[in-house]
Amino acid sequence: MTAQELVLAAVAAIFTEYDVEAASDLLAPDYVQHNVAVPTGADPILGFIPVLEESGIELTTHRVVTEDNIVVLHNTYHNAQALGAQTLVAFDVFRVEDGQVVEHWDNLQEPPAETVSGRSMTDGPTEVVDPALTAENKALVSGFIEDVLHGANPERITDYISPGLYMQHNPMVGDGLDGLGAALAAMAEAGQPMTYSETHFVVAEGNFVFAVSEGAIGETPTAFFDLFRVDDGKIVEHWDTVSEIPAEMPHDNGKF
């Protein structure tokens, strides 16, 4: 199986087929866990599968982005009380080695009933296109992250985002550069400025580029998982999940 096929099979075994035996074959015994509520290793996941089955959890995967041995899933979990809420939107990131899933990162957010843009946290295009432009699009988004999100050259924002087309799925941000600027200004005025301090990795496939970053909202350590869609050399659409990084976790692997 390819890395993508292996990850999709593992996720299906855990969340839709509830097949402990299949999952145990697909997860490495020393599976490295970065979820802030789950201990590391395969055994905690395998032991939780009967609870998931009893809960009636439902999983919808909206997008899949794969680069080499890293696979990113853009998911919605319904009936997700076992994970902490009725509904959760998530980015789940998996690393594959030697025919097994060996590492997992995620960022989960409860979606609000209404969003500023009128878009949901998951709707929009899903198809990966332009595979020949993967490296070019990854470089574009990496530049945007460095110059704009990390603040190296924020005045260059229009080098990366078209002023006329920027579709937003963050529930608190409106469309376009005006919507982004208004949201950032409102956060700063409220004493809760959003800052990015480090981007840990970027994953790209065709027109989609995904980034895992940490920073803060106000004084609260925060994880930012961002997905960008690129078209004709500009970022035209953005999805994300944002969550607080807790001070304590049930493992020593950290959030990242």
Image (cartoon, helix red, strand yellow):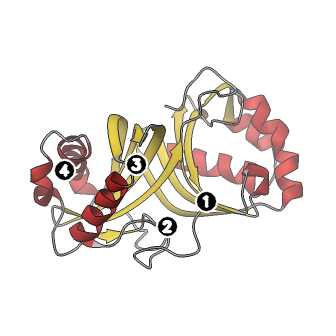
- In the rendered image, the vertical position of residue 114 relative to residue 203, given as above or below: below
Real-space CA distance between mark 1 and mark 2, rounded to the nearest whole angstrom: 10 Å
For mark 1, give the secondary structure: loop
Q: Is residue 215 left or right of residue 57?
A: left
Residue 192, numbered circle = 3
Disc 2 to disc 4: CB gap under 8 Å: no
Q: How far apart are the two marked residues, 3 and 4, measured between alpha carbons?
A: 28 Å
Q: Any mark on residue 129, and which?
A: none
Q: Earlier in the sequence, mark 4 or mark 1?
A: 1
Q: In this view, does 36 lie to the left or right of 96?
A: right
Q: Which residue in the structure is indicated by mark 1?
A: 110
Circle 4 or circle 1, nearest the eye: 1
Instruction: Say which of marks 3 and 4 sits in front.
Output: 3
Q: Relative to residue 177, is residue 97 drawn left or right?
A: right
3D distance between C-alphas at marks 2 and 3: 22 Å
Q: Amino acid type of disc 3?
A: Gln
Circle 4 sits in a helix, a strand or a loop, which is it? helix
- The residue that disc 4 covers is 140
- Between residue 132 and residue 58, name the one nearer to us: 58
Residue 179, given in percent of the width and then of the height, sits at 29, 69
Q: Amino acid under label 2?
A: Met
Total marks shown come to 4
Regarding mark 2 in the picture, which secondary structure is present there? Answer: loop
